[in-house]
Image: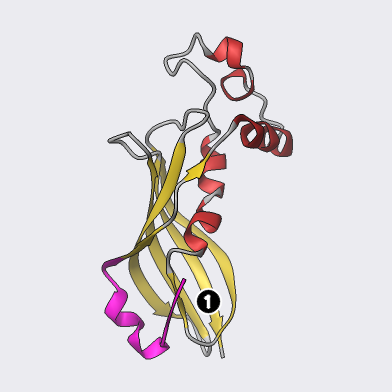
Amino acid sequence: MKVVPVDQLADYVGKDIGESDWFTVDQDRINAFAEATNDHQFIHVDPEAAKMTPWGTTIAHGFLTLSLIPYLTAAAGIIPEGLVMAINYGSDKVRFLEPVRVGSDVRAKIHLAEVTPKGPGRLLFKTNVTIEIKGSDKPALVAETLSLFVVQ
């Protein structure tokens, strides 16, 4: 993660600011997410039944893919100098475009759309995050995410 002085953050607005390493979405992770959310739909947890679907295998929950954004972007983006803490502030828009098949590698590409002061020592970052699937022309999802950074 690159640390940027607050007075230089505007230089990064409108630019791609990083991409994560590839991350494998395996069946154990999908099963754990199913347990955590009580979403045991067969397309996620039953490999035999999932063979009959258009994807031919189990797929990750869309919200599992979405939930990987903080992890994937943590090492790849930028943070303001003097960071005390970062808070997930929400999402303005999320679109699930392609299912993530079990065993797929995904990564995040990050574009800084806006930096808005939200009071003394608080900055709101709006980022456009694309979760790519290795070997696919279509991304798994695109999202506008909001993060509140508290700085000293």
Q: Position of residue 98 (x, y in %)?
A: 39, 32
How many numbered markers are drawn?
A: 1
The front one of 134 and 62 is 134
Q: Which residues are magenta?
A: 1-16
State the image coordinates of residue 3 (x, y, percent, origin top left): 45, 80
Q: Residues within 10 Å of mark 1 (few under 14, many from 20)?
A: many
Colour scheme employed for the rendering of this structure: secondary structure
Where residue 41 appears, as percent x and y from the top left, is 62, 22
Report the side of 37 relative to 145 (left or right). Answer: right
Q: Residue at x 41, y 88 (%)?
A: 5
Residue 111 position, x and y percent, is 33, 62
Question: Which residue is the site of mark 1?
Answer: 149
Residue at disc 1, secondary structure: strand
- Say which of 45 and 106 sits in front: 106
Is the residue 120 above or below the residue 100 in the image? below
Q: Quadrant of residue 14?
A: bottom left
